[in-house]
Image (cartoon, helix red, strand yellow):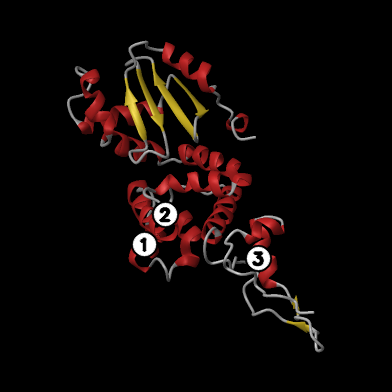
């Protein structure tokens, strides 16, 4: 009898989930397949492709490729706010990302704001996300077996040598300034001073730790000013900074509700 349709019909974009997981996608396309039934049978070679790439182009395929590249970067210890790191992650998608000028990433070092600007453009085109780190939500929702990777990405971003500059820039220009500026009277007089305060707290916190709500976040506390800075990667402004009325007891509240730890592995098992 006939061997049926191969590759499987596009009617169900999640067909690969029944075949052992997303990373089997490469094997299903890049190995020889048995010919359909009838009299002739015999082996027919699949269309040539690069065994080092995934060929499931639609649906979760792009996210799968991104996850694999991110894992490679983490395994090598690459800085996730460095231009060359993201160039290596995205270079196989260059044709689709012509408008995002990802070649410029090769020369970007020490400028995380410019790097994330290009990454933002690229991931909007590839995955349809609204802001660069929203892809972490897609990993948790569409590839739950890779949710640990999403937590590791957050941790590695905050360990970057350039993280303090990135977070200070976005947080100081986001809702934190409009909502909490009055709390900082006498400490800062402008958004630029607010950014410097945030940057200094991230560089030299009195206390810090990870906690998890919908995604892993990182908290930085400063005793001298009674200020908390929270990196929240799913927020368009990447987090917030404010001076809680309860002071340092705010850390205990986070600990009681979510857990607060310096060991990221406790949150992503």
Reading the image, the residue beneath label 1 is 104
Residue visible at 62% across and 72% down in the picture: 50
Residues at circles 1 and 2 in contact by the CB criterion of under 8 Å: yes
Q: Is residue 33 left or right of residue 257?
A: right
Can you say which quadrant of the picture contains the N terminus?
Answer: bottom right
Nearer to us of marks 2 and 3 is 3
Q: Position of residue 38 (x, y in %)?
A: 79, 85
Q: Position of residue 44 (x, y in %)?
A: 74, 83
Reading the image, the residue beneath label 2 is 83
- Residue 174 in sight here: yes
Image vertical order of residue 263 relative to residue 169, above or below: above
The local secondary structure at tag 2 comes to helix
Which one is nearer the viewer's eye here, 179 or 204? 179
The first of marks 2 and 3 along the sequence is: 3
Distance Cα–Cα, label 1 vs label 2? 8 Å
Which one is nearer the viewer's eye here, 122 or 204? 122
Which one is nearer the viewer's eye here, 59 or 23? 59
Residue visible at 42% across and 68% down in the picture: 96
Residue visible at 64% across and 61% down in the picture: 15
Can you say which quadrant of the picture contains the C terminus?
Answer: top right
Numbered tag placed on residue 174 in the rendering: none
């Amino acid at each position: 009898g006939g061997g049926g349709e191969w590759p499987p019909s596009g009617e169900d974009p999640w067909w690969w989930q029944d075949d052992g997981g997303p990373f089997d996608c490469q094997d299903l396309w890049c190995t020889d397949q048995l010919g359909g039934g009838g009299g002739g049978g015999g082996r027919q070679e699949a269309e040539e492709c690069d065994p080092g790439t995934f060929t499931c182009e639609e649906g979760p395929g792009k996210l799968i490729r991104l996850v694999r590249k991110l894992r490679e970067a983490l395994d090598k210890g690459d800085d996730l706010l460095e231009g060359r790191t993201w160039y290596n992650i995205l270079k196989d998608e260059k044709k689709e990302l012509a408008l995002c000028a990802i070649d410029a990433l090769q020369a970007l070092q020490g400028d995380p704001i410019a790097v994330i600007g290009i990454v933002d453009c690229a991931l909007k085109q590839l995955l349809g996300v609204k802001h660069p780190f929203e892809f972490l939500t897609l990993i948790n929702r569409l590839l739950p077996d890779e949710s640990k990777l999403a937590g590791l990405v957050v941790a590695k971003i905050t360990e970057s040598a350039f993280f303090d500059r990135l977070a200070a820039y976005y947080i100081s220009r986001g809702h934190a300034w409009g909502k909490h500026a009055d709390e900082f009277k006498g400490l800062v007089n402008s958004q630029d001073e607010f950014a410097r305060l945030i940057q200094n707290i991230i560089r030299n916190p009195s206390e810090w730790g990870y906690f998890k709500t919908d995604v892993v976040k990182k908290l930085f506390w400063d005793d001298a000013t009674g200020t908390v800075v929270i990196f929240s990667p799913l927020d368009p402004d990447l987090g917030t900074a404010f001076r809680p009325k309860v002071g340092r007891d705010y850390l205990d509240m986070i600990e009681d509700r979510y857990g607060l730890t310096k060991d990221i592995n406790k949150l992503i098992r």
